Image: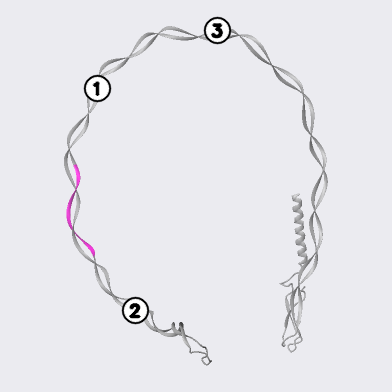
Amino acid sequence: MKQLVAGALAVTLLALVATDASAHGRRRGGRGGCAPAYPVYGGGYGDCGPAVQYTYQTEYREVQRTVYRMQPVTTTVNVWESVPVTTTEEVNVTTLERTTREETREVTYYEREVTTEARKRTVYRCVPETQKVTRVVCRPVTEEVEQTYTVCVPSVEERTYNVNVPYTEQEEREVTRTVCRLVNEVQSREVTTYVCQPVQAGCADPCMPGCGPAYTSGYQMVPVTQTVNVNVCRVVPETVSQKVLVNVTRFRQEERKANVTVYRTEQQTRKVQVTRLQAQQEEVEVTVNRLQPVEEEVNVQVCRLVPRTRQVNVTVVECQPVTRAVSRQVTRFERRQAQREVTTYQCVPEVVTERVPFTVCVPVVSAPAAPCGPVTVAAPGCY
């Protein structure tokens, strides 16, 4: 089934490529499909005809092409299949049946019997005896030996060495620093003060009859704003160069002498007492234990097993075969023919109409702006 589907897809792709090639196969030549241009002359150089130009336009045309599609087809086929069939059969089954019976048997067993017997044995006893042996003894021996050793002898030498001695001298250097200077300037400020003024009471219009003279009923504080000049100190930074004396430390070399203790090696000889071990042989008497065999009689208890016989009752089990008819189910597979529906895919051709873009070369005529010579236009054969 997979091979059939793959074949159908390959045929469809080939049909699409062939249709596209037939639709666009008429394009020959350069970019627009036009033939190369050649010169066309008008009536003369004095009066030239209209100028001809060509433009490219895209048109859509209907083109038919064949498309292959996969169509499912269902068919009925005959297949063989195995069907299980269960039947009941009678078979003969042989089993063993157990039977018991009582019988008398003679049994032999062993009893333990202990007796005393006189036996001889060999015993080894330790017998001490004195022997003379030679042994090696290490004794210390002291003697005087002359030895040579190395010693370090000190001596004093006068040596000269250089040292760097620091000294300080003053050096004049120019230093630049920023100094803040106070500058007095006059600025105008608005100051508000309060003035105590009397409050008049009495008749509002003194010309009216019956109105008495005005009098002061109290005082009130009235704010008064005025402009005053104030001296203000402003900080102005400025850069000042100044020469200062700086202490500079320098070093000078001086030659000095000093006594140095120097050690040298020297070989010396001395006599020392040396003790060493010296091996010497000597004879000594030693007591040695020797094993001597001795025979003696001892009474030994001996255990023996004596056979005895007696009658006992024994239960005997016997198995006898018995055959019986038993029914059982047996499953067998029978081969039968059956019909099944199978779906396959066939490649069916179909004609499809599509709109395909085409590029067309269209002439455009325009009036000449001035007398002209030979004009180069495209040759016919465009589409």
Q: Which residue is mark 2?
A: 240
| Horizontal relation, residue 195 to residue 336: left or right | left
| Mark 2 neighbour class, 10 Å CA radius: few under 14, some 14 to 19, many 20 or more | few
Percent x, y for residue 264? Answer: 19, 50
Confirm whether the magenta stretch covers residue 163: yes
Q: Are marks 3 and 1 in contact (CB under 8 Å)?
A: no
What separation in Å lies between label 3 and label 1 (alpha carbons)? 69 Å
Confirm whether the magenta stretch covers residue 93: no
Please give the range of residues in magenta: 148-164
Amino acid, disc 1: Thr
Image depth: mark 1 or mark 2 in front: 2
Amino acid, disc 2: Val
Image depth: mark 3 or mark 1 in front: 3
Magenta highlight: main SS: strand
Q: Which residue is mark 1?
A: 134
Quadrant (top left/top right/bottom left/bottom right) for the C terminus: bottom right
Secondary structure type for disc 2? strand
| Horizontal relation, residue 131 to residue 6: left or right | left
Residues 378 and 285: in front is 285
Name the disc covering residue 186, or none. none
| Res 362 visible | yes
Q: Which image quadrant for residue 185?
A: bottom left
Percent x, y for residue 219? Answer: 45, 83
Upstream in sequence: badge 3 or badge 1: 1
Q: Which image quadrant for residue 381?
A: bottom right
Q: Which residue is mark 3?
A: 308
| Mark 3 neighbour class, 10 Å CA radius: few under 14, some 14 to 19, many 20 or more | few
Upstream in sequence: badge 2 or badge 3: 2
Secondary structure type for disc 3? strand
Against 54, residue 126 (above or below) is above
The residue positioned 37% from the left and 83% from the top of the image is: 184
Image depth: mark 2 or mark 3 in front: 2
